[in-house]
Amino acid sequence: MLKGIPKIISPELLKVLSEMGHGDELVIADGNFPSQSVGRNAKVIRADGSGVPEILDAVLALIPLDSYSEKPVVLMEVVKGDSVPTPAIWEKYGEILNKHESGNCDIEYMERFAFYERAKNAYAVIATGEEAVYANILLKKGVVK
């Protein structure tokens, strides 16, 4: 066991976060995201019993966002014509981002298939059991100072 590491961070996830370098991207995926197929060239870490907000909070306690990137956070935008309103979970993300990253929380909203394409180049995908829709979030790792 280690001190100071959130309990939700598995040894496998801790290793992956340590391996990631500046500019590498990480997807924290909801339960509907095609993690295995999109993450075919990435490291896929299962966190089925956890939700995206809990994982996001724990991950941001350990890694910074890229301060050199204009928008180091990407969300999958709601598909036009979908009856889903602005996802309530996005407000939670804002709170978590503000808790860990003051001033560098600009968010890019990306069309669904464009998000999938970008996610194919991610270093890792964390597959959660999150049930909220449009809960996928992509983070660009910054420099630890």
Image (cartoon, rainbow, N blue to C red):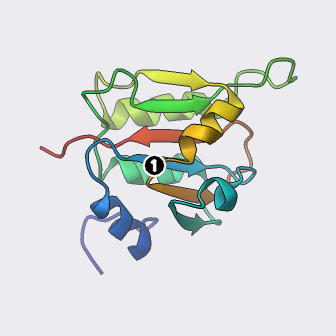
**Residue 128 occupies quadrant:** bottom right
Q: Which residue is farthest bottom? A: 1
**Residue 11 occupies quadrant:** bottom left
At a point 26% along the width and 45% down the height, the residue shown is 22
Q: Position of residue 138 (x, y in %)?
A: 50, 40
89 and 11: which one is in front?
Answer: 11
Residue 93 drawn above or below residue 4? above
State which quarter of the image contains the C terminus: top left
> Can residue 123 be seen?
yes
16 left or right, relative to 34: left
Q: Position of residue 30 (x, y in %)?
A: 66, 49
Residue 123 drawn above or below residue 74? below
Q: Amino acid at mark 1?
A: Leu
Numbered disc 1: secondary structure: strand
Residue 116 drawn above or below residue 94? below
At a point 45% along the width and 32% down the height, the residue shown is 73
**Total tally of numbered discs in the picture:** 1
Q: Position of residue 121 (x, y in %)?
A: 50, 47
21 and 94: which one is in front?
Answer: 21
State which quarter of the image contains the N terminus: bottom left
106 left or right, relative to 20: right
Q: Position of residue 43 (x, y in %)?
A: 49, 64
At a point 30% along the width and 63% down the height, the residue shown is 19
> Can residue 10 be seen?
no
Name the residue that disc number 1 marks: 26
Q: Which residue is farthest left? A: 145
Circle 1 packing at 10 Å, graded few (<14), some (14-19), many (20+), is many
At a point 77% along the width and 21% down the height, the residue shown is 85
